[in-house]
């Protein structure tokens, strides 16, 4: 339909430019507004081709855009844009991997912090590490195709981000049990947590695999939006939201609700108690909650850019906004860094690390 639209536009412009009055009045002003060759790179292939075809038909002196690639398995982008996206993701992944590795090494090196809650942080860091490492399977491939390797990467980039999300929910649940219900011994529930996290992640990741939806999705492999022939797959696009973005925002809402409830309950308790010692204990909990308030912020901050980009990709599939995509990649890959800074590298861990280094 888009190709027919361009052909129809070309035909209309041809008859329009045959008018001498048009050529003498409108044409000079129109040509002056067309993009330069450099600014053609701000548009996708199809968007730029529209501008360029108009300039050729109208006789404007505009150079042809260069180094454009029309990827049949994803949004049309320039080679330069694809390379920038992949480099940005590669750098962000390497930074995130270093922070996730630091978190896991701290857990293994410091025996005093090997509590049940920090063990959950270890599993979260492991999931973040595997998420970023999965991109390194083929980090700078500008010609991705439907292949077994692409399917493997697509599956891994579905499984481990979901596991990371669900471990965040588990940590929230455990903290709720400790702070609100005063349950400190929850280690016996660890097998249940493993079954829920890894099992749910596996089910949600296998379903697109059965449907054959894993393939090129831009600069890496995930749930492809088009098939091998370049035809758009509406069901696959829906699976992106069913399989990942839907659970993501459900978990974010639940996490925010839990922390909001804890803060509200503790504040109400402070108003009700009269003992100074009890108030002191509750205020200590409130101090902890100030740091805990960062926990729901992490998934929100990292999820918003990619969610916006994916929605724009659905609404305007042929003209994806490159700048939004870059921000989404850079911010989204920082989840491992933020999780490590908030969960692992806290004051208690730093104190034990300092003591170990001083020995």
Image (cartoon, rainbow, N blue to C red):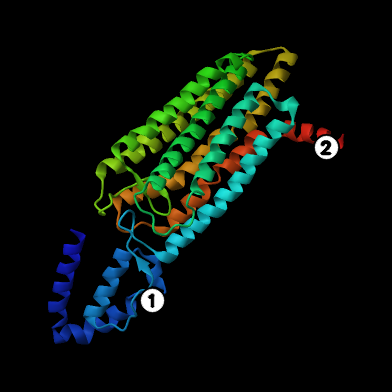
Q: Position of residue 148 (x, y in %)?
A: 38, 45
Which quadrant holds residue 317? bottom left
The reply, left or right, for residue 268 in relation to residue 47 is right
Q: Position of residue 354 (x, y in %)?
A: 81, 36
Image quadrant holding the C terminus, namely: top right
Q: Which residue is mark 2?
A: 357
- Residue drawn at (30%, 54%), measured in percent from left and top? 316
Circle 2 — which element? helix
Identify the residue under disc 1: 37
Please state which of residues 129 and 276 is positioned toward the viewer in this rendering: 129
Residue drawn at 34 percent across, 80 percent down: 63
Query: Which secondary structure lies at badge 1?
Result: loop
Tell me, for residue 115, which label it has, or none.
none
Q: Quadrant of the N terminus?
A: bottom left
Identify which residue, 121 or 194, lies in the foreground.
Answer: 194
Classify mark 1: residues with Cα within 10 Å, few (<14), some (14-19) or many (20+). Answer: some
């Amino acid at each position: 339909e888009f190709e027919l639209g361009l052909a129809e536009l070309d035909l209309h412009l041809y008859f329009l430019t045959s008018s001498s009055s048009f050529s003498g009045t409108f044409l000079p002003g129109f040509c002056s507004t067309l993009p330069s060759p450099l600014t053609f790179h701000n548009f996708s292939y199809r968007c730029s081709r529209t501008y360029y075809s108009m300039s050729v038909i109208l006789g404007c002196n505009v150079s042809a855009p260069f180094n454009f690639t029309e990827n049949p398995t994803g949004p049309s982008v320039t080679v330069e844009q694809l390379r920038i996206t992949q480099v940005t993701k590669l750098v962000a992944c390497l930074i995130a991997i270093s922070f996730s590795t630091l978190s896991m090494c701290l857990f293994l090196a410091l025996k005093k912090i090997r509590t049940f809650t920090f063990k959950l942080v270890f599993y979260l860091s492991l999931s973040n590490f595997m998420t970023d490492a999965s991109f390194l399977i083929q980090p700078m491939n500008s010609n991705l195709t439907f292949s077994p390797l692409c399917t493997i990467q697509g599956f891994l980039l579905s499984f481990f981000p979901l596991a990371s999300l669900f471990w965040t929910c588990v940590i929230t649940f455990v903290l709720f049990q400790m702070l609100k219900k005063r349950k400190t011994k929850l280690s016996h529930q660890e097998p249940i947590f493993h079954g829920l996290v890894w099992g749910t992640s596996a089910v949600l990741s296998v379903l697109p695999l059965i449907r054959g939806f894993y393939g090129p999705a831009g600069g890496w492999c995930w749930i492809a939006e088009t098939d091998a022939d370049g035809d758009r797959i509406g069901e696959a696009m829906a699976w992106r939201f069913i399989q990942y973005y839907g659970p993501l925002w459900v978990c974010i809402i639940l996490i925010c609700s839990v922390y909001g409830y804890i803060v509200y309950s503790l504040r109400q308790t402070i108003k009700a108690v009269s003992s100074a010692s009890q108030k002191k204990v509750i205020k200590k909990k409130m101090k902890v909650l100030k740091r805990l308030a960062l926990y729901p912020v992490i998934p929100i901050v990292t999820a918003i850019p990619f969610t916006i980009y994916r929605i724009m990709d659905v609404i305007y599939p042929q003209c994806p906004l490159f700048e939004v995509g870059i921000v989404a990649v850079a911010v989204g890959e920082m989840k491992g860094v933020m999780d490590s800074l908030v969960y692992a590298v806290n004051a208690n861990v730093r104190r034990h690390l300092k003591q170990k280094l001083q020995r």
